[in-house]
Image (cartoon, rainbow, N blue to C red):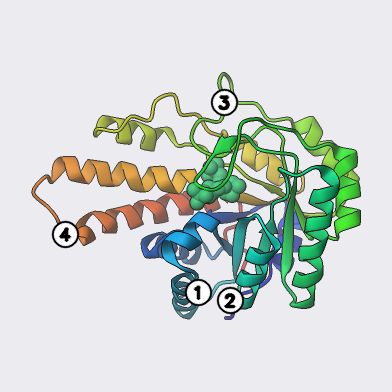
Amino acid sequence: MPLTSPKEMFEGAYQGEYAIGAFNVNNMEIVQGIIQAGEAEQSPLILQVSAGARKYAGQKYIIKLMEAALEEADLPIVLHLDHGQTFEICKEVIQGGFTSVMIDGSHLPLEENIALTRQVVDYAHDQGVWVEAELGRLAGVEDEVSSEENVYTDPDEAAEFVERTGCDSLAIAIGTSHGAYKFKGKPQLDFDRLEKISSMLPGYPLVLHGASSVLPEFVAMANQYGGSVADAVGVPEDFLRRAARMGVCKINIDTDIRLAMTAVIRKYFKEHPQEFDPRKYLGPARQAVKDMVQHKIKNVLGSSNKV
Ligand code: G3H
Ligand code: 13P
Ligand code: ZN
């Protein structure tokens, strides 16, 4: 099966009130773990690549890994650019074969965000490529994506933004953030705001970034085996189920993959200090990615058996 567009995936997700997981990939073990989970659950998948991941692995390697994945697994799979910052990067990945891009103009003033998004939409739609845009801003720091503050999405502005840009899906800010430290106190999302945005844009797919749950078992394991991931808090999984019933069709998960791999590798190193064969620790790390992603698909996103 060739790489596909999110269109049909999101139509099914919207109608069926579930979400498609968009998992960040950086290397072979991560790709394999996610694909194995998708196969086990017969779930559609979005694999997404940030600018940092593209720099780390190289676009050619990513594309070849995806080709291998598509030969192995008979699943609908989207290859998506995560947080594209410029028109040029979107154009480059589209030329490389990505079937979906995010143009992230969320740091720009509204009119500039609209103009940049429109430019990407015009180019991408000519090539049959899907465009996700962002309105509002998520707090959190990643390699190439960072913001100090959260700016929640305004529902009226969201409707105007979609109308004027022609973007196919919209990432919104309702209280999630990137990374492992999402909430100071009790986790809270602005579901009233989500409901308003959803009702302004009926049938339209929304996207939730910063949606890792920062699973306590992996935080505890990382800390037990020499890590220092203190006070990490993520989005409770029942919040994600709720969002999936309110028009959120794509849920982005990266931090949970990072934590699962790191925790398992730390444990392995501590228990096998004499070992130095990377396959010995990358194998269990890949298995941890598979198990974690399978859990998300089955128990959180609800996308099992939707292929
Ligand atoms: O939203 C950002 C993703 O988690 C990617 O992070 O820029 O460190 O690859 P990165
Ligand atoms: P997390 O940091 O919560 O995994 O969010 C990932 C993300 O939004 C990628 O775009
Ligand atoms: Zn993001």
Q: Residue at x 61, y 70 (%)?
A: 93
Pick out the residue farthest to the left.
Answer: 274
Does residue 42 appear left or right of residue 275 in this picture? right
Few, some or many residues within 10 Å of mark 1 (<14, 14–19, 20+): some
Res 96 label: 2
User: Can you identify the residue that label 3 sits on?
Assistant: 183
The answer to which quarter of the image holds residue 1 is bottom right
Residue holding disc 1 = 63
**Horizontal placement of 248 versus 298: left or right?**
right
Which quadrant holds residue 246? Answer: top right
Query: Helix, strand or loop at disc 3?
Result: loop
Query: Where is residue 273 shown, x and y percent of the image?
Result: 11, 44
Cα distance between the residues tagged 2 and 1: 8 Å
- Tag on residue 284? none
Helix, strand or loop status at disc 4: loop
Indicate which label's residue lies in the foreground, 2 or 1. 2
